[in-house]
């Protein structure tokens, strides 16, 4: 893929003076860290390393990446390593994609309680899948799946939702057989929606009772128990959308599909169309009109405010595993699944790109790191006739 013409780092640099004077005090420390990381990513400020060709001896300097999970430049290698690890866990069955969304009325409260309510979103959606799948009138099996949290819509507005990728089937209650799902059908979405609503609202009640929620601004009246209970009743009149996409085939398609959803940030550099001294224009898909491509123009401040709203709490995992794929059960139950499916270990089920390796521009042989450099050493080395690259 060609290098994008504009980057979020360009927007931060152009807007830095205005942000510092008007918004810095209102930003959280994690948000400030994200801004600093993105603007310094793959620059001399983070240091780098000297690479040398293993064949012709050609040398070059590469800048270090910031490795911040919200940086659009640092996700490729992380995604490739993660996908390589997941490759070994694939089963020879169809896979399903289920999406859980919450009503818009909940969004302001969720943003005031990110850690608590994003965790509840994971738990309620996971418990819903596990419960409905375990019932004999549906699948009657113990399933396993991974869940991915996204908090944004196409225009960077708040839109919290969970993507679940689920193998088509599960273990019987006695773990003696594999129960397959019917062709092209996983679980009834109407049932999933009702159970999800019940579990999420029950979790809200529990969090309120345990005083785990905070209330500010427009949400402040909800601190009163009577108002909060009234709010909960309104949620039962809202649409709780659970969407199950058609199965996207066996393991040969899963990894490429997952690559579109894991390690994604709110907006990639490739969606930026133009960056002026005051505004940024980006592409977005209008899903309400058959995914038509449109453009939107925002001021730097509005764009960055929307972007920073999707910075997750420190240490909060965006990808989680449940059922027989849960971290504590995976090593014992995955081999059992393979045995019941009479499947060999999925060593080469799908082709996953190797982590990026730098090649010599002269002879195309591999480059290897021969020296690590601090920021001052990089600046000093740049004064010499050695080629400098901004990849690492």
Image (cartoon, helix red, strand yellow):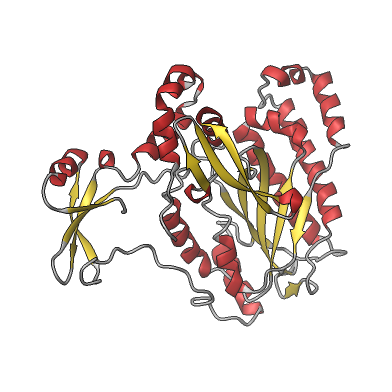
Q: Name the residue nearer the viewer: 262 or 271.
A: 271
Q: Is residue 238 left or right of residue 82?
A: right
At x 19% / y 46%, what residue is drawn? 373
At x 88% / y 37%, what residue is drawn? 237
Q: Position of residue 42 (x, y in %)?
A: 32, 46
Q: Quadrant of the N terminus?
A: bottom left
Residue 342 position (above or below residue 294): below
Q: Hey, which quadrant is residue 98 in on the image? A: bottom right
Q: Is residue 236 left or right of residue 89?
A: right
Is residue 309 among what the camera can see? no
Q: Quadrant of the C terminus?
A: bottom left
Q: Name the residue nearer the viewer: 120 or 104.
A: 104
Residue 10 position (above or below residue 95): above
Q: Position of residue 139 (x, y in %)?
A: 81, 66
Residue 22 position (above or below residue 88): above
At x 57% / y 63%, what residue is drawn? 330
Q: Hey, which quadrant is residue 131 in on the image? A: bottom right
Q: Position of residue 348 (x, y in %)?
A: 49, 77
Residue furthest to the left in view is 384
């Amino acid at each position: 893929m060609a290098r994008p013409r504009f980057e979020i780092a360009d927007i931060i640099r152009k807007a830095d003076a205005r942000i510092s004077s008007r918004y810095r005090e209102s930003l959280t420390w994690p948000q400030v860290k994200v801004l600093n990381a993105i603007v310094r990513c793959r620059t001399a400020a983070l240091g780098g390393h000297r690479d040398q060709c293993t064949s012709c001896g050609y040398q070059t300097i590469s800048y270090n990446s910031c490795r911040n999970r919200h940086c659009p430049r640092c996700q490729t290698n992380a995604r490739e390593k993660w996908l390589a690890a997941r490759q070994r866990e694939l089963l020879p069955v169809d896979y399903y994609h289920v999406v859980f969304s919450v009503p818009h009325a909940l969004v302001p409260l969720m943003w005031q309680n990110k850690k608590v309510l994003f965790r509840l979103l994971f738990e309620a959606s996971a418990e819903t899948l596990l419960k409905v799948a375990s019932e004999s009138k549906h699948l009657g099996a113990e399933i396993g799946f991974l869940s991915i949290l996204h908090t944004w819509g196409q225009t960077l507005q708040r839109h919290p939702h969970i993507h679940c990728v689920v193998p088509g089937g599960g273990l019987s209650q006695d773990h003696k057989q594999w129960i397959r799902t019917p062709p092209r059908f996983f679980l009834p979405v109407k049932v999933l929606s009702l159970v999800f609503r019940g579990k999420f609202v029950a979790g809200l009640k529990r969090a309120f009772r345990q005083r785990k929620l905070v209330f500010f601004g427009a949400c402040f009246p909800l601190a009163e128990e009577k108002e909060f209970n009234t709010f909960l009743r309104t949620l039962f009149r809202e649409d709780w959308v659970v969407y199950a996409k058609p199965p996207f085939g066996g393991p040969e398609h899963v990894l490429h599909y997952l690559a579109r959803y894991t390690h994604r940030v709110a907006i990639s550099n490739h969606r930026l169309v133009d960056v002026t001294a005051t505004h940024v224009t980006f592409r977005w898909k209008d899903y309400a009109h058959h995914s038509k491509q449109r453009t939107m123009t925002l001021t730097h401040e509005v764009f960055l405010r929307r972007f920073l709203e999707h910075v997750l709490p420190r240490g909060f995992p965006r990808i989680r595993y449940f059922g027989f794929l849960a971290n504590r059960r995976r090593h014992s139950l995955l081999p059992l699944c393979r045995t019941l499916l009479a499947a060999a270990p999925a060593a080469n089920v799908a082709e996953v790109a190797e982590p990026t390796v730098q090649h010599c521009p002269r002879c195309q042989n591999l480059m290897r790191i021969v020296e690590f450099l601090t920021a001052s050493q990089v600046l000093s080395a740049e004064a010499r006739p050695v080629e400098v690259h901004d990849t690492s």
